[in-house]
Image (cartoon, rainbow, N blue to C red):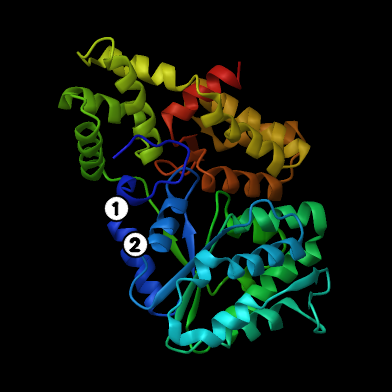
Amino acid sequence: MAFITGQVVRDKNFWNRKLELEDIWEAIKNGEHSLLVAPRRVGKTSIMYKILDEPKDNYIALYMDSEEDNFEHQFWARLFNSLKKEEFTNKFKSNITKFKAIIKAIDIKKISLSGIEFKETKAINYKDAFEELMNSLPKEQKVIIMIDEFAQTIENIIKYDSEENALNLLKTHRAIRQANQSNNIVFIYAGSIGLESVVAKLDGMKHINDLKPIKVSPLEIDDAHDFISHLLTHNSIKVDKIQIDYMLDKIEWLIPFYIQLILDEIKKLSRKNPNITNDTVDSAIDNALEHKNYFDNWRSKIKDAFSDEGYLFSKEVLNIISEHKTISKNNIANIADKYGVSDDEKRETLQSLVYDGYINNSNDIKIYRFNSPILRMWWYKYVAN
């Protein structure tokens, strides 16, 4: 098991998320469409790849990342082109030659705002084109379509296309899900920003209320210890339990990303001095904070996601928490007034910061703090000062 940070973890490097995978497969077998709920870096994408790489019998999975799609028709172009790829079509058994022939024969002439035009056929809308394709599947063949960064796609369409087309994409997806009476097609959506908070801006919650939320949580303490034990064994590093406990206490938000990040730095330090102490752990954390590419997207995300006023508001809230460790709701309200942020925008911004993994108020509803002390230290060092 290698140290992997910032990338999708697959095969032998994937740390099994037994409970989450059981929840997801139960939903799939029941024909329920799911929404993976978790902040970024928790491991949603790696879980989706686990399903892609190791589907259950008679299930075929497709994974697609739509983060770069800024227009509704771009999304559909990516989906149809994904369906055409051999790594998807080759998974089908030989007895569904009709479907394979149809899907391989898809020759898109143009995808426009109004629909899809196939060569030598008339233009048809996205929903009809997709349903026509899926209806050629034998009823016993089950397909899982996993769409990553779907919320970001909706937000992109709002920003670069139109709210109308963003809402239309949500409506079309719901219509496709509802029309699938045989339950042989299941959708799983995920992303690093909250779909609910984005859809709420469009007053479109009714278009996603059929999705089953499945929470992807940080590791429990015992699981974190097992995870570390496997990593240390496979990387030939010796760290005593006292230092492991000290490290976990420092990390606090026990997601694989932070655990691997700090252990990777400990491994580098151990080459000079194999005696790992608490000071070694502290040095590993300091060294990890130097990796700008691992952290800077936390800053850029809020700049892209919020209005100018919302960005300044959220940045000051995070700056204060990074210095003082907590902030009260009253103080947050004063900062919102300072930047002319309305109550609705303040509430939506806070919800986004919570969902996206920056902060939480789990211990006290009136007090917010960073989820991750590691992120808090980085923010204080490189953003607040």
Classify 7 as above or below 65.
Answer: above
What amino acid is found at the position of numbered circle 1 in the picture?
Answer: Asn
Q: CA distance from mark 1 to mark 2?
A: 8 Å
For residue 155, which quarter of the picture? bottom right
Residue at screen point 39% across, 33% down: 258
- Of 94 and 158, which appears nearest the observer? 94
> Horizontal and vertical percent for residue 271?
28, 14
Residue that mark 1 sits on: 16
Q: Secondary structure at mark 2?
A: helix
Q: Under tag 1, what secondary structure? A: loop
The crowding category of the residue bearing disc 1, from other C-alpha atoms within 10 Å (few below 14, some 14 to 19, many at least 20), is some
Q: Looking at this view, is 209 or 24 the one in front?
A: 24
**Is 276 on the left or on the right of 127, as rendered?**
left
- Residue type at the position of mark 2: Leu
In depth, the one of 42 and 47 nearer the eye is 47
61 lies left or right of 230: right
Residue at left offset 55%, top offset 49%:
192
Tell me: residue 275, above or below residue 96: above
Asked if the residue at tag 2 contacts the one at tag 1, i.e. Cβ–Cβ closer than 8 Å, the answer is: yes
Query: Could you say where residue 106 lies in the image, as x and y percent from the top left?
Result: 68, 76
Check residue 339 in the rendering and tell me which mark sits there, or answer none.
none
Query: Which residue corresponds to the image point at 43% horizontal and 45% vertical from the top-left?
Result: 42
Q: Position of residue 256 (x, y in %)?
A: 36, 40
- Which numbered tag is attached to residue 21? 2
**Quadrant of res 91:** bottom left
Does 41 sit left or right of 260 as displayed?
right
